[in-house]
Image (spheres, rainbow, N blue to C red):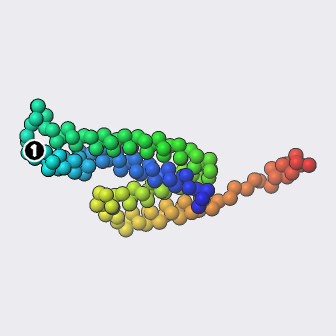
């Protein structure tokens, strides 16, 4: 598994980036709701209370959303670098399959834990199929055709 480490981490970072984007950009973002509520508690402002023409707590709620957006960009940059290195480590086909599977698993984890989503039996069957496919791909050993092996042996002598 050590040789596939970077491909797997890149897939996990891809899912993390998606989660951060949802927190940053979704209208019903729990981060925005939390920060808005915290602002109201700290300042004592009402939902409709306007300060200087703006709802102060709404503006404050953009700060953690902006932070999530910045973290998403950093995560995406890191993910792209690790993905490229992961493909160098394990080959492009295996690296891509591993990154996709890790992304799939991590997205499901975030969906259940952070967003309260349910996993259906159909999803589980698909998940098992993805794992079997990744297992088959990661176990493939590419062989040179016999003719090419003989030619390489002649060059060495």
| Side of 39 relative to 146 (left or right) | left
Q: Nearer the viewer, residue 141 or 36?
A: 36
- Residue 126 pos. (x, y %): 44, 63
Residue at image point 33% right, 42% down: 67
Q: Nearer the viewer, residue 39 or 112?
A: 39
When asked about the image quadrant of residue 142, the answer is bottom right
Asked whether the viewer can see residue 20, the reply is yes
Disc 1 crowd rating (10 Å Cα; few below 14, some 14-19, many 20+) is some
Give the residue pinned by disc 1.
45
| Side of 43 relative to 79 (left or right) | left
Residue at image point 39% right, 56% down: 107
| Side of 75 relative to 91 (left or right) | left
In the image, residue 69 above or below residue 1: above
| Side of 109 relative to 28 (left or right) | right
- Label 1, secondary structure: give it: loop
- Residue 42 pos. (x, y %): 15, 48
Residue at image point 30% right, 40% down: 66
Number of numbered discs: 1
Q: Which residue is situated farthest in the right direction here?
A: 157
Residue at image point 17% right, 50% down: 37
Q: Which residue is situated farthest in the top direction here?
A: 52
- Residue 23 pos. (x, y %): 30, 47
Can you say which quadrant of the picture contains the N terminus? bottom right
Q: Which residue is situated farthest in the front direction here?
A: 42
- Residue 32 pos. (x, y %): 23, 46
Asked whether the viewer can see residue 47, the reply is no
């Amino acid at each position: 598994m050590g040789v596939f480490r970077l491909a797997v981490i890149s897939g996990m970072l891809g899912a993390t980036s998606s989660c951060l984007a949802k927190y940053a950009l979704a209208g019903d973002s729990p981060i925005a709701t939390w920060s808005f509520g915290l602002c109201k508690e700290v300042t004592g402002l009402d939902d409709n209370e306007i300060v200087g023409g703006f709802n102060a707590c709404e503006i404050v709620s953009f700060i953690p959303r902006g932070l999530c957006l910045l973290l998403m960009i950093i995560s995406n940059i890191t993910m792209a670098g690790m993905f490229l290195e992961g493909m160098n480590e394990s080959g492009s086909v295996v690296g891509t399959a591993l990154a996709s599977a890790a992304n799939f698993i991590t997205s499901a984890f975030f969906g259940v834990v952070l967003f309260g989503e349910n996993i259906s039996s159909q999803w589980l069957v698909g998940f098992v199929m993805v794992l079997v496919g990744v297992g088959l791909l990661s176990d493939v050993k590419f062989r040179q055709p016999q003719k090419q092996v003989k030619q390489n042996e002649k060059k060495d002598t």
